Image (cartoon, grey):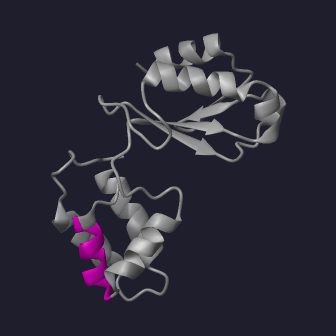
Amino acid sequence: MAREHEGAVDLGRVDEIVARHKGREGALLPVLREVQDAVGYLPQEALERVALGLGLSLSQVYGVATFYSLLYTKPKGKYTVRVCESAPCHVQGAQEVIDTLVRELGISFGETTPDGLFTLEKVSCLGVCGVAPAVMIGDRVYGNLTPETVVAVLQEYR
């Protein structure tokens, strides 16, 4: 995934993405996903450019960008740590794992570490109840976690 440096949004790249989809029904969501892949998130200036290019209002574009949980209007860390909050994870000790993650990363849910390495998010279910409690980092799932094992998992990414 090619990402721009924060603050250095290539609006020409955004325009190219919009141009490839312009005139297609349902183009907005694919455009937003491609822009996010290119830039790393959906900054205000990119949303404005998408709205202009697709002939939509900024509120329409912003509404879609903020509705979907996999679209981000703020920069995210290199690794997104998704913590399962399902009942099976909770019963199996997820709160202790959550407390450890918050302490180790020094951030709360929805925040990114100052070094830009980790973003911490809650999810309702990862679909791996048999190995609860679980987290997902990037596209890799870690289960049967304890406070000690989650610290070891974080070390793999540091």
User: Which secondary structure is most common in the magenta stretch?
Assistant: helix
Q: Position of residue 157 (x, y in %)?
A: 45, 22
In-front residue for pair 57/93: 93
Quadrant of the rendering where the C terminus is positioned: top left
- Toward which corner of the image does residue 22 lie, by quadrant? bottom left
- The magenta-colored residue range is 45-55
Is 139 on the left or on the right of 62, as rendered?
right
- Please tell me which residue is depicted at 34% across the width and 62% down the height of the picture: 35
Residue 8 lies in the magenta stretch: no
In this rendering, position of residue 147 left or right of residue 46: right
Q: Is residue 135 left or right of residue 120?
A: right
Q: Residue at x 30, y 47 (%)?
A: 2
Q: Residue 97: horizontal and vertical position, in percent?
A: 64, 23
Residue 154: x percent and y percent? 50, 19
Give left or right: position of 13 versus 157: left
Please provide percent x and percent y for residue 75. Answer: 33, 47
Residue in the image at 28% along x and 47% along y: 3
113 vs 44: above or below: above
Which residue is at 62% across, 36% downward? 83
For residue 101, above or below residue 17: above
Counting every numbered tag in the picture gives 0
In front: 156, or 67? 67
- Pick the residue in front: 152 or 66: 66
Magenta-colored stretch includes residue 47: yes
Examine the rendered structure and indicate whether residue 153 appears above or below residue 67: above
Q: Quadrant of residue 119?
A: top left
